[in-house]
Amino acid sequence: MTVEVATARKGSVMQQLVVVGNLVGDATVAVVPRAAGRLQDISVRLGDRVSRGQPIAKIEDFELQEQVKQQEAALEVSRATIRQREADLKLAEINAERSRNLFARQLLPKQTLDDTEARYQSAVAQLDLARAQNNQSTARLDELRINLANTVIVSPVNGFVARRAADPGAFVGQNAPVVDVVDITRVRLVANIVEKDLDQLRTGDETRVEVDAFPGEVFTGRIARVAPVLDPATRTASIEIEIPNPGFRLKPGMYARVTVTTDERKDALVVPSNAVIDLGGRRGVFLAAENDIVSFRPVTVGLEEDTQLEILEGLTEGDRVVTTGAAALRDGDRVLLAASGAGRRGADPSGAAADQAIDGPSEPGAGGRRSAGGRRGAGAARPGAVTP
C-alpha cells in the first residue's frame, strides 16, 4: 500500500475559538420628536452623515410662535402690575406711618388709624399677588419656548441615517420615529458561547475578524463584555466583541467570523492532523520504520488546529509518521512510501516535510473550525454558537 509520511517537528500551535454572526452598529437610535405636529421640513436622507445636536427636521410652529408672543405681552403686563402695586404699597406705607404719628398725639381717631393700617396690609397682599402672577406668566412663557424649541428635531448621536420614516406634510407624534441614526465608528458582534468555553475568554482579549464582504482581509477587534450569567434554557452566555471602524467600511448586517486565540504553544511537537487516528479506542499514529514496516504508537494529543496537532506524549522530534493512508493500516503492515519530499528516505528530518498533510500545509497562526470532529483533542479549536 502506498502512503505518505511526515516528520514530527517543533512548531507553533494555537487553540482557537470561532464565533460567527452579523455585525451591528455601536448604537442605533430611533429619533422621535418631542412634540406632536405636522412635519414642515426634513433635511436628511438615507445614508447622510449627521452629528450629535444637528437639526434634521422641523415641525410646524406657527401657533406656538403666536402663543409665545401673547405670553410675552402678558408677562409685560404682569411686570407693569408689579410696578403699580409697589407704588401703591409705598403710598399706603407713608399714610400708615402718618396716621400712627397723629394717633400717638391724639389728633386722629382710632377708626381712621385702623382704616389706614388695613389699606397698608391690602397693598402688601396686592403686591404679593402681582409677583405670584408674574412668576406664573414667566413659567408659562418658559414652557412655550421649550415647546417651540422641541419643534426642531435634532440627532442625539453621531452617525448615519439608516432609515427615513416620514416626509414633509406628515403628522408626527411622540410614538413614531422620524429617522433612525446608527453610529458605526465601532461595530459589534454579539454571540452566544457555551458554558464550557466561557472560562477561556477574558474581557480585553484581542480577536481576528473576517468579513465575507472583504475576502482575504483581517480586521482586529477585542472582547468588550462577557455576560456574568448564563441563559438556563440554552446554557450559553452572551459576549460582545467590538471592532474599530475608522473608515466606516464595516456595515451593520454584514456576516463576520471572529477568531479568538485562547491558548498558544510556541515550541510544541506537532504532526499533521491526518496522522492521528483512532485504533481500538486509542488515539495514535503509525510510525514508518526504515524497513517500511509500520507500527502503531499511542499518543497524547494537546492543542489542535485544522491542519496540525500538538503531541504531548508518545513521539519525539524527527519521528516519521504516516499521514495519507494511515486510516487503512494495521500494526506490522508493509508500506510503499509515496515519491514525495515527505516520504523519501534520507529526506531532511528538520521538519520541512512535516507539512505534507492531507489538508495542506499548516500556516503559522492559522486555526478555525475542525472538519474531523472525531479527531478533536481536549484543546481543539471549537466554533462558537451562531448568533441568532
Image (cartoon, helix red, strand yellow):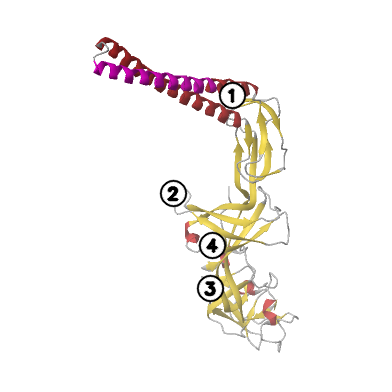
Q: Which is more foreground, mark 3 or mark 4?
A: 4
Q: Tell me the chief SS of the magenta region.
A: helix
Secondary structure of the residue carrying numbered label 1? helix
Circle 1 sits on which residue?
A: 68
Question: Quick one: label 2, few (<14), some, or many (20+) residues within 10 Å?
Answer: few
Circle 3 sits on which residue?
A: 302
Query: What amino acid type should be assigned to the residue bearing mark 2?
Result: Pro
Asked if disc 2 and disc 3 are in contact, CB closer than 8 Å, the reply is no
Which residue does the image show at 66% across and 31% down from the upper left? 58
Q: Which is more foreground, mark 1 or mark 3?
A: 1
Q: CA distance from mark 1 to mark 3?
A: 77 Å
Please determine whether, in this image, residue 308 is positioned above or below residue 60.
below
* Precedes in sequence: disc 2 or disc 3: 2
189 in the magenta segment: no
Q: CA distance from mark 2 to mark 4?
A: 26 Å
Magenta segment boundaries in residue numbering: 76-105
State the residue in front, 79 or 203.
Answer: 79
Query: What amino acid type should be assigned to the residue bearing mark 3?
Result: Gly
Please determine whether, in this image, residue 22 is positioned above or below residue 118.
below
97 in the magenta segment: yes
* Farthest right residue in view: 339
Q: Quadrant of the N terminus?
A: bottom right
Q: Which is more foreground, mark 2 or mark 4?
A: 4
* Precedes in sequence: disc 1 or disc 3: 1
